[in-house]
């Protein structure tokens, strides 16, 4: 009787239909791929045991038998019972696998990456199981879109592959069990709607933060003799040790400008034509860390975040710093926090759900020292504001207030007049809040004034033909706006507004003759010191990115660039433009 009742209960559940995948061997990956697809090499032969895989992606009806609270229709996608479920994290998918196993007495889990590609190819060796092209009749908005176009995500609308699997190319991306190499990211396969067709290839490897929930992401399941649980990964060391900073110089200092964007020595490190949008911080012990994005197109999935370290007067060749596979990585920031003899570095990162920078999730990780003078360790990248949306494009230059709050500026939207959003953590970065307000101008720099109020300058939203100033007396929840005395800045330019350790507020921005630095000793009321950022020598420099080659001399400085700045414990001000590293101190500005 009990067996009969269990059988009837299972019949009432909308269970996924499973198909048999035979054991065999196949060639996994791509032979000699282009740089963007470096992670598909080397091509290798893989042996796979027999297993069973769901014929379609898990649907809303199937998933909601497990989680009745799941909400459909995010951004208007996936409203029907037979549409692929979306807005599920890797952990959500694993929880469904465990539930399905408990309900049926069988072992369900996510497919391994090898199983997924083997099943997708179904004996083929071409780019898609349909051949070297994927038929346009099966496309679901296969292009990069800033505003995603609506399309049905109903499963099994088209013919399956030779092994009876539907929608292995497109519809929604599918979580796999594996970590993406030696990272904290999970592998994602198959591509989705609102994605260029090349990312739907059988060999294409994508990945995502484990907690990601997106309108692009779903999953299918595998039945085998192995249970669903997968062991997590460790912290990763950057292999560096700590040294020391020297004492502040007593005399004015302006050192030779240096390039910090240096091509990698390792041919396997992705390095593209467009290197832009830096962030920089000092590392306790005598080192600078600079990061920036490298890409062919700013609205590109190939975008990576690279790093370089400055020690003993020179920058190291670029190497990979952070990459969520096949996701746009626009917007990075770094912050060094110290408390007594303890210190940490925070890395903030925008992570796209596709190729555009409009819909970004806000992520953060920490760099910790595992022992005094030992190597630094990065924690996993985690979402602190997980929704892919506007107001999450990170701007370099976060600060810590006197009462310990961390303030992070982000562009409020992709438009040049969208302004800047402010995100606040009151518990050292554990939890975050978007204040919901808007600072005038994108790419804003922010400082805390001595009375506890906040002051920010930004690009765009000009007032009376001048750069706008925003003031808040309630921690950034409301702002008043006024004109500064400085000219507005535009395309290819980003300012720095920073409190120096000696006390004055410093502005670095652009005027008629190029890059200048200004000082205020009265909390931004007046700016008595304004100085072109040049030592008077004539040089021809390459500013990279949107700047290109320029002449620096007694009356001209760099005409544009995205600025980022840190002041190291020895008092040196390190200002980065899109490619150039400037080094000077307060005494030089004041002389």
Image (tube, rainbow, N blue to C red):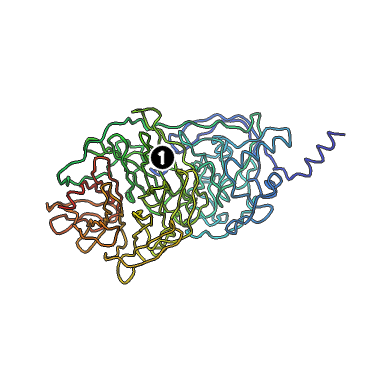
Quadrant position of the N terminus in the picture: top right
19 vs 573, nearest the viewer: 573
Left/right placement of residue 532 relative to residue 96 reads left
Left/right placement of residue 286 relative to residue 25 reads left
Which of the 4 image quadrants contains residue 456? bottom left
What x and y, as percent, mark residue 534?
A: 17, 53
Left/right placement of residue 454 relative to residue 541 reads right
Which of the 4 image quadrants contains residue 8? top right
Name the residue rendered at 27%, 37% in the picture: 316
Left/right placement of residue 494 relative to residue 353 reads left
Q: Is residue 323 above or below residue 531?
A: above
Q: Is residue 280 above or below residue 515?
A: above
For this orientation, the residue located farthest to the front is 451
Which of the 4 image quadrants contains residue 230? top right
395 vs 38, nearest the viewer: 395
What x and y, as percent, mark residue 382?
A: 49, 42
Categorize mark 1 by other alpha carbons within 10 Å: few (<14), some (14-19), many (20+).
Answer: some
Q: Is residue 16 above or below residue 533?
A: above
- The number of numbered discs placed on residues in the rendered structure image is 1
Q: Which residue is mark 1?
A: 38
169 vs 313, nearest the viewer: 313
Name the residue rendered at 58%, 58% in the picture: 151
Q: Secondary structure at mark 1?
A: helix
What x and y, as percent, mark residue 257?
A: 19, 47
54 vs 238, nearest the viewer: 238
Name the residue rendered at 29%, 51% in the picture: 578
For this orientation, the residue located farthest to the right is 1
What x and y, as percent, mark residue 440?
A: 38, 63
For this orientation, the residue located farthest to the bottom is 464
């Amino acid at each position: 009787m009990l067996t009969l009742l269990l059988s009837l209960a299972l019949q009432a559940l909308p269970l996924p239909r499973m198909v048999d995948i035979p054991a065999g061997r196949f060639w996994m990956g791509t032979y000699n791929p282009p740089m963007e697809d470096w992670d598909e090499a080397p091509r290798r032969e893989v042996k796979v045991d027999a297993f069973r895989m769901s014929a379609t992606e898990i649907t809303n009806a199937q998933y909601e038998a497990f989680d009745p609270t799941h909400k459909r229709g995010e951004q208007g996608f996936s409203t029907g019972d037979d549409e692929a479920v979306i807005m599920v994290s890797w952990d959500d998918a694993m929880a469904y696998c465990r539930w399905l196993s408990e309900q049926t007495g069988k072992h369900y889990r996510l497919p391994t990456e090898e199983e997924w590609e083997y099943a997708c190819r179904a004996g083929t060796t071409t780019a898609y199981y349909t051949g070297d092209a994927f038929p346009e009749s099966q496309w679901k908005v296969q292009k990069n879109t800033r505003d995603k176009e609506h399309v049905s995500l109903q499963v099994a609308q088209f013919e399956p592959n030779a092994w009876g699997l539907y929608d292995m190319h497109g519809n929604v991306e599918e979580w796999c069990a594996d970590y993406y190499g030696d990272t904290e990211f999970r592998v994602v396969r198959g591509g989705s709607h609102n994605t260029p067709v090349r990312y739907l290839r059988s060999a294409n490897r994508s990945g995502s933060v484990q907690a990601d929930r997106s309108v692009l992401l779903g999953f299918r399941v595998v039945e085998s003799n192995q249970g669903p649980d997968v062991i997590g990964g460790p912290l990763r060391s950057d292999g560096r040790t700590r040294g020391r900073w020297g004492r502040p110089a007593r005399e004015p200092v302006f050192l030779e400008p240096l390039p910090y964007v240096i091509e990698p020595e390792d041919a396997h490190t992705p390095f593209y034509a467009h290197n832009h949008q830096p962030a920089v911080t000092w590392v306790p012990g005598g080192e600078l860390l600079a990061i920036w994005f490298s890409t062919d197109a700013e609205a590109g999935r190939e975008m990576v975040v690279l790093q370089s370290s400055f020690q003993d007067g020179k920058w190291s060749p670029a190497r990979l710093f952070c990459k969520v596979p096949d996701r746009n990585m626009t917007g990075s920031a770094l912050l060094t926090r110290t408390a007594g003899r303890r210190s940490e570095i925070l890395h903030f990162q925008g992570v796209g759900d596709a190729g555009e920078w409009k819909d970004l999730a806000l992520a953060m990780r920490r760099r910790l020292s595992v022992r005094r003078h030992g190597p630094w360790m990065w924690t996993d990248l985690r979402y602190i504001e997980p929704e892919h949306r506007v107001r999450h494009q990170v701007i370099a230059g976060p600060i810590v207030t006197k009462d310990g709050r961390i303030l992070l500026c982000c562009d409020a939207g992709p438009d040049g007049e969208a302004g800047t959003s402010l995100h606040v953590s009151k518990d050292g970065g554990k939890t975050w809040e978007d204040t919901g307000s808007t600072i005038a101008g994108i790419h804003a720099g922010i400082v805390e004034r001595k009375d506890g109020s906040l002051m920010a300058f930004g690009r765009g939203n000009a007032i009376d033909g001048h750069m706008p100033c925003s003031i808040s007396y309630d921690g950034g929840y409301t702002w008043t706006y006024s004109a500064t005395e400085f000219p507005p800045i535009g395309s290819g330019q980003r300012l720095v507004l920073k409190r120096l350790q000696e006390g004055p507020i410093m502005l670095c921005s652009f005027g008629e003759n190029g890059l200048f630095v200004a000082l205020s000793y009265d909390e931004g009321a007046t700016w008595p010191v304004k100085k072109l950022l040049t030592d008077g020598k004539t040089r021809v420099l390459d500013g990279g990115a949107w700047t290109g080659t320029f002449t620096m001399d007694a009356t001209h400085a760099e005409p544009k660039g995205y600025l980022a700045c840190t002041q190291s414990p020895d008092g040196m001000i390190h200002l980065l433009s899109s490619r150039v590293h400037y080094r000077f101190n307060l005494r030089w500005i004041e002389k």
